[in-house]
C-alpha cells in the first residue's frame, strides 16, 4: 500500500489540509496518494486547472446540493481494480466480480447523469457511457441494484432451474423418506448441471466484458480525479480563499491577508481569531524579525503552506495571492533534531541547507527558514543568518528567514517586523493559570507584520513577555538588575 | 405451544448452544422448515467448521433454506451454497473467509454460512438485512461463552442443550441451568452515563468478542454515587487488590470485557464478605465462571448484573450424543423443566420433519 513516490508535504499545514479532505471513494483517495506538486514548466496547463476549479467553485456556491449528491455517489463506490485485473488476465469472473462491475457501471451512470443534468461543464471530466454495460449485466427491463445470473442468459439454464424447482416442491411434499431421498439425489444432479451452465454464462459475460476494460480503467481515474477536484472546491469554500495568480520566476510572492487553515481552526476552537498575514517574499532574501511569541513562525508557515497548496492545485487561503509557480518549497525549521542519526537540531539545519542547495539546479524555489541557527550562540548565530541572507541572494531563491538575531545587514532584502506588544507597560496577569497567561499575552500582542525600510531591527521585548508569562519573581528581579 | 409459534414475533433471534453439537443447527433447520416465511434472513457468528465437525468428527448438519430467504455469508462460501441466488448486497464486513455478502435464495437449497464475529459488525449486518426488508433474522450462534455478538444483537434467544455435554442427565441439567442463569442475570437499572459510554465505545472498537489480549482499562470501580473511583485492566492482578481495598463501602465494578473465572477465584481467595459488591458485565455471555463460583459469590452477598439482559425464550434438547448414545429425552426434558423458568422443547421428537 505504501507508495514510495507518494508526496510528503513539507509543511504540517498542508499535511493537515490533505488529511482533512472529504474523500470517500477509493478512487479519490488513490488520486490524492498519486498527487504530485506542479513545477514551473506546468504553468500554462496549471492556469487552466485553476480556471476549471474556479468554475466548479462558482457552480457549487450556487448549487450547494450538488456537493451532497456527488458525495452520496462517491460513498457508494467500491474498488474494482482487482476484478478488472482478473478480467484482463482472462479469468472467468465470479458472481461477486460481476456484481461489483455492475454496481460500478450503475454508479458511474448516476454520476454522469447528475453532471449532465447540471449546468456544469468541465473540460477534464468526461464520463464513459456505461448504459450498454449495465444492460448486459441486468437483462431485465427494470434496473435493480442486485445481481444474478439471469435465466435469459441461457435457455438451458432456464430449463434446468425450472426442473430443479419442481424437484424442490416434490421434496417438500414428500412423506415417504426413501422417496424424498431419491428426489434429493435427482436435485443434486440438477444442481451440478446448473453450476456447469452458470460457469458457461459467466465465461461468456467475461468475454463480453473485455471490450469494456479500457473504459472501466479510465472511469476509475476520472472519478478519482473528479472527487479530488470536488474536495478542492469544498476546501476553498470552507475557508476564505482566492484563485492564485501565477507569475514569472523573477516576480515576488505576494500574500494578502493569508491564513493557515490548521491554525485558523485551532484558534477558532479557543474562540480566538487568526491574524491574517500580508507579506511579500522577493526573489533574494526576506527577513522577518519580531518579539518572542509574536507569531513569526506562524507567518512563515502560513506563506509556506499556501505556496505548497497552490503547487498541489488548491486555491490559496488569502484575499489575494500571487506567486511564481515554484519548482520546490523547502522548509528548514530547526526542530529536526534526530538523536537516532546523531544530529543535534543545529546539525540537522546544516544538513538541510546542504540538501536545499542541491535543489537550486532544479529551477526556482521557495526556501523558508524558521529561526535559522537558533540553537547556537548569538555571536556565531548572527553570522550564520547574515551568510544565509547573502547566500539566498546569490542562489536566486525566494528565501524568507524568521530570526531574532540583531544586526543583520542585507542591502536589497525585504524586511518585516511583527508589530509586537501593543503598549510598553502591559497589565500584569491576574491569574497564574497557563491558559489565562497565554490569553493575556495574546490580548496584548499585535501579530500583524509591518514593513521596515531596508533595515532589520529586533525589538527587545523578551523581558516584558517573560513578565507577562508570570516568570518566577526572584528570577525576574535578578533579570531586571541586568537591564539597568 | 410449538417452538415455531413461540418465536413467531421475534425480529432477531439468536440460537446459541451450551456446547458444540448441542443441536443449534437442527433447531435452525426446524424453524426454517416450520415457518417458510419469505421475509426470513439467516446468518451466523463466524464459521463453525466444515462438513465434518473438526472437533468431534461428526457429520455437521447443513442448513436447508426455503425460496425467498436471505442468507448473509462469506464470499468464500458462496460456491458451497446450492440454491439459485441473487446477490443483494456487498456488506463491506470482512471475515477470514471473505466479505460477507447478502444473498437471496431464488430456490430452496443448502447453505453454508459464515457471518461476522464481532458485536459491532453483527449490529451493522442486522441493520443492512432490515434495510433489505428482512422481517425476521435468525443468527446461528456458537457455544454460549462465544456468542456475545449474537445475544447482544438479537432481541430473543434460544439455548440448545443435550447429550453432547455429558452422558449423565444430572450433569447436563446442572450445566444448562447455570448457563441459563448467567444469560438471564437481571439488568442493572442505574448505570452511570460515563459507564454507558464506555460500553458503547468497547462495542464499537472490539475486534475480539471478549477483552482477552487487551491491556486497556476494561474494569471500572464506581462508588455509591456512580462516580468512577478507579479503572484498571481486569487481566492485571492488581484489579483484585483494588476491589478488595474498596469493599468496605458499596462498590460496583463494571467490566466492558469478560469476567473471568481466574479473577473471580482470586477475589474469593482475597476477600470474605462481598455484600457490598456488584459485578456488572455487558451481558450474560461475559460471565465466564463456573456454577460453584457463582454459588459462592452469591452466598457471600455479591450481586451479578448485566447492562443488557438476554430475553431467553426457551431451551431445546438434543438427546443424541455425537458419540452415538441417546438419552431418555422425556426424562431429560422433565428434569430441565423442573429447574428452568422457560419452556423446554425436545427437537428430535419433532412436530415437523427436519430436513
Image (tube, helix red, strand yellow):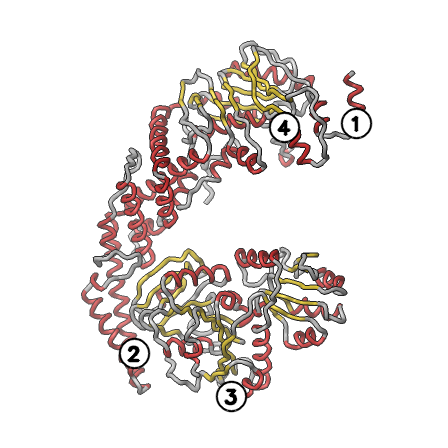
- Any mark on residue B327, and which? 3
Distance from the alpha carbon under mark 2 to that under mark 4: 87 Å
Q: Chain of mark 1?
A: A
Which is more N-terminal, label 4 or label 2?
Answer: 2
Q: Residues within 10 Å of mark 3 (few under 14, many from 20)?
A: some
Q: Which mark is residue A185?
A: 2
Labels 2, 1: one chain: yes
Same chain shared by disc 2 and disc 3: no
Q: Nearer the viewer, residue A37 or A456?
A: A456
Question: Looking at the picture, do discs 2 and 4 lie on one chain?
Answer: yes
- The residue that disc 4 covers is A443
Mark 2 and mark 1 residues within 8 Å of each other at the beta carbon: no
Is residue A379 or residue A62 the one in the foreground? A62
Frontmost of labels 2 and 1 is 1
Circle 3 marks a residue in which chain?
B
- Quadrant for the N terminus of chain B in the image: bottom left
Q: Which mark is residue A475?
A: 1
Foreground disc of the pair 3, 1? 1
* Chain on which label 2 sits: A
Q: Are marks 3 and 1 in contact (CB under 8 Å)?
A: no
User: Is label 3 in a helix, a strand or a loop?
Assistant: loop
Secondary element at image label 2:
helix
Amino acid at each position: 500500500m505504501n507508495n514510495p513516490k507518494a508526496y510528503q508535504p513539507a509543511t504540517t499545514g498542508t499535511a493537515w489540509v490533505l488529511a482533512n479532505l472529504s474523500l470517500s471513494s477509493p478512487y479519490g483517495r488513490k488520486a490524492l496518494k498519486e498527487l504530485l506538486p506542479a513545477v514551473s514548466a506546468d504553468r500554462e496547463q496549471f492556469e487552466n486547472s485553476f480556471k476549471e476549479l474556479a468554475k466548479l467553485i462558482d457552480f457549487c456556491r450556487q448549487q450547494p446540493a450538488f456537493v451532497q449528491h456527488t458525495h452520496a455517489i462517491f460513498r457508494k463506490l467500491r474498488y474494482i481494480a482487482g476484478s478488472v485485473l482478473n478480467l484482463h488476465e482472462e479469468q472467468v469472473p465470479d458472481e461477486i466480480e460481476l456484481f461489483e462491475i455492475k454496481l460500478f457501471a450503475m454508479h458511474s451512470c448516476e454520476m454522469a447523469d447528475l453532471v449532465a443534468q447540471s449546468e456544469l461543464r468541465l473540460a477534464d471530466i468526461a464520463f464513459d457511457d456505461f448504459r450498454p454495460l449495465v444492460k448486459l449485466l441486468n437483462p431485465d427491463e427494470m434496473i435493480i441494484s442486485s445481481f444474478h445470473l439471469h435465466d435469459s442468459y441461457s435457455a438451458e439454464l432456464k430449463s434446468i432451474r425450472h426442473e430443479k424447482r419442481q424437484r424442490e416442491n416434490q421434496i417438500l411434499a414428500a412423506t415417504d423418506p426413501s422417496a424424498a431421498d431419491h428426489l434429493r439425489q435427482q436435485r443434486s444432479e440438477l444442481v451440478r448441471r446448473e453450476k456447469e451452465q452458470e460457469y458457461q454464462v459467466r465465461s461468456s459475460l467475461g468475454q463480453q466484458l473485455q471490450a469494456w476494460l479500457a473504459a472501466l480503467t479510465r472511469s476509475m481515474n476520472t472519478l478519482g480525479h473528479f472527487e479530488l477536484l470536488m474536495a478542492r472546491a469544498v476546501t476553498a469554500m470552507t475557508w476564505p480563499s482566492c484563485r492564485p495568480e501565477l507569475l514569472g520566476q523573477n516576480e515576488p510572492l505576494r500574500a494578502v491577508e493569508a491564513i493557515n487553515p490548521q491554525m485558523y481552526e485551532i484558534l477558532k476552537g479557543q474562540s480566538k481569531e487568526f491574524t491574517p498575514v500580508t507579506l511579500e517574499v522577493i526573489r533574494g532574501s526576506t527577513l522577518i524579525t519580531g518579539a518572542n511569541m509574536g507569531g513569526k513562525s506562524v507567518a512563515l508557515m502560513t506563506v509556506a503552506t499556501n505556496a505548497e497548496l497552490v503547487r498541489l492545485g488548491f486555491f490559496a487561503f488569502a484575499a489575494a495571492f500571487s506567486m511564481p509557480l515554484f519548482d520546490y518549497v523547502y522548509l528548514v525549521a530547526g526542530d529536526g533534531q534526530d538523536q537516532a542519526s546523531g544530529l543535534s537540531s543545529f546539525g540537522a539545519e546544516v544538513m538541510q541547507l546542504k540538501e536545499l542547495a542541491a535543489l537550486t539546479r532544479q529551477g526556482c524555489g521557495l526556501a523558508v527558514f524558521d529561526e535559522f541557527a537558533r540553537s547556537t550562540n548569538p555571536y556565531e548565530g548572527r553570522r550564520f543568518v547574515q551568510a544565509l541572507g547573502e547566500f539566498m541572494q546569490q542562489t536566486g531563491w525566494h528565501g524568507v528567514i524568521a530570526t531574532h538575531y540583531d544586526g543583520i545587514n542585507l542591502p536589497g532584502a525585504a524586511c518585516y517586523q511583527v508589530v509586537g506588544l501593543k503598549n510598553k507597560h502591559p497589565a500584569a496577569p491576574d491569574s497564574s493559570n497557563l491558559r489565562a497567561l497565554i490569553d493575556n499575552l495574546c490580548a496584548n500582542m499585535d501579530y500583524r507584520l509591518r514593513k521596515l525600510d531596508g533595515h532589520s531591527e529586533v525589538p527587545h521585548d523578551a523581558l516584558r513577555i517573560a513578565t507577562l508569562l508570570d516568570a518566577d519573581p526572584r528570577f525576574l528581579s535578578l533579570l531586571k538588575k541586568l537591564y539597568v | 405451544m410449538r417452538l415455531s409459534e413461540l418465536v413467531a414475533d421475534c425480529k432477531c433471534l439468536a440460537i446459541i448452544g451450551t456446547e458444540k453439537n448441542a443441536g443449534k443447527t437442527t433447531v435452525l433447520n426446524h424453524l426454517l422448515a416450520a415457518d417458510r416465511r419469505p421475509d426470513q434472513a439467516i446468518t451466523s457468528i463466524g464459521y463453525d467448521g466444515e462438513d465434518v465437525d473438526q472437533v468431534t468428527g461428526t457429520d455437521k448438519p447443513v442448513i436447508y433454506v426455503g425460496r425467498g430467504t436471505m442468507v448473509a455469508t462469506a464470499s468464500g462460501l458462496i460456491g458451497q451454497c446450492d440454491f439459485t441466488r441473487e446477490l443483494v448486497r456487498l456488506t463491506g464486513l470482512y471475515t477470514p473467509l471473505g466479505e460477507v455478502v447478502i444473498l437471496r435464495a431464488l430456490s430452496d437449497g443448502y447453505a453454508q454460512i459464515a457471518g461476522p464475529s464481532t458485536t459491532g459488525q453483527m449490529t451493522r449486518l442486522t441493520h443492512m438485512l432490515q434495510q433489505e426488508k428482512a422481517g425476521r433474522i435468525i443468527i446461528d450462534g456458537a457455544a454460549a461463552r462465544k456468542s456475545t455478538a449474537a445475544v447482544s444483537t438479537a432481541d430473543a434467544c434460544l439455548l440448545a442443550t443435550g447429550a453432547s455435554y455429558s452422558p449423565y442427565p444430572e450433569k447436563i441439567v446442572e450445566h444448562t441451568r447455570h448457563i441459563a442463569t448467567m444469560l438471564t442475570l437481571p439488568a442493572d437499572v442505574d448505570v452511570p452515563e460515563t459507564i454507558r459510554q464506555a460500553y458503547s465505545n468497547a462495542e464499537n472498537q472490539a475486534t475480539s468478542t471478549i477483552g482477552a489480549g487487551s491491556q486497556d482499562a476494561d474494569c471500572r470501580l464506581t462508588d455509591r454515587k456512580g462516580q468512577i473511583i478507579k479503572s484498571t485492566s481486569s487481566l492485571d492482578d492488581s484489579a483484585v487488590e483494588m476491589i478488595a481495598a474498596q469493599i468496605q463501602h458499596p462498590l460496583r465494578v463494571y467490566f466492558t470485557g469478560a469476567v473471568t473465572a481466574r479473577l473471580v477465584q482470586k477475589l474469593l481467595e482475597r476477600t470474605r464478605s462481598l455484600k457490598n459488591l456488584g459485578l456488572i458485565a455487558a451481558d450474560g455471555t461475559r460471565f465466564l465462571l463456573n456454577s460453584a463460583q457463582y454459588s459462592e459469590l452469591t452466598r457471600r452477598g455479591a450481586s451479578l448484573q448485566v447492562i443488557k439482559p438476554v430475553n431467553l425464550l426457551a431451551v431445546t434438547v438434543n438427546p443424541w450424543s455425537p458419540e452415538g448414545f441417546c438419552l431418555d429425552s422425556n426424562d431429560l426434558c422433565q428434569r430441565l423443566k423442573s429447574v428452568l423458568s422457560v419452556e423446554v422443547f425436545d427437537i428430535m421428537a419433532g412436530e415437523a420433519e427436519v430436513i
